[in-house]
Amino acid sequence: MSIDRAHVPGCDDAALTPLSLFVGASVAGPDGKAVGTIADVMMAAAEGRIVYVALSVGGIVGIGERLFAVPWGAFVVDPANGALSVRETAGFDGPGFDKDEWPCVADTNFLPHRLVSA
């Protein structure tokens, strides 16, 4: 599934992407290889903030899949090419979270490393 944009009339540079298009979208790693599929997007509705993206990794038809609470900042969205990827794939070999007990927060281990200049 590719990611599509919705152009907003009267806004020259604005492009909106509906959250519904992310659910079921394939996610690639920085090398272009498939990592998983977006199971859902969890947001704090009152604040209008994405808390994390539930990424499904491995398994076949839901059997053996692992779910990870990946922060939105770990993703790269390329609407021009209809692509969605993660900045790093380290950590997706772990157990993930239980499908019956979803976390309240993102797993910060998936945030990209940031360089701090002195």
Image: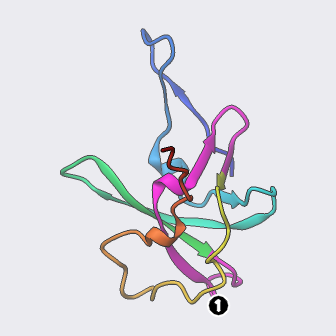
Query: Which residue sits furthest left?
Result: 46
Q: Is residue 32 above or below residue 110?
A: above
Q: Residue at x 51, y 62 (%)?
A: 111
Query: Which residue sits furthest front?
Result: 118
Q: Tell me the quarter of the picture where residue 87 sits.
A: bottom right
Q: Residue at x 33, y 57 (%)?
A: 43
Q: Is residue 10 left or right of residue 4?
A: left
Q: How many marks?
A: 1
Q: Residues within 10 Å of mark 1 (few under 14, many from 20)?
A: few
Q: Measured from the top left, where is residue 80 in percent x and y?
A: 68, 31
Q: Which residue is mark 1?
A: 64
- Residue 33 included in the magenta stretch of the image: no
Colouring rule applied to residues:
rainbow
Q: Tell me the quarter of the picture where residue 63 sits.
A: bottom right
Q: Is residue 69 above or below residue 16?
A: below
Q: Is residue 38 left or right of residue 36?
A: left
Type of amino acid under label 1: Gly
Task: In this rendered view, identify the residue nearer to me: 4 or 88.
Answer: 88
- Residue 77 included in the magenta stretch of the image: yes
Q: Measured from the top left, where is residue 15 in percent x and y?
A: 51, 26
Q: Residue at x 73, y 36 (%)?
A: 81
Range of magenta residues: 57-84
Q: Measured from the top left, where is residue 104 in percent x and y?
A: 30, 73
> Dot 1 lies on which element?
loop
Q: Residue at x 68, y 59 (%)?
A: 26
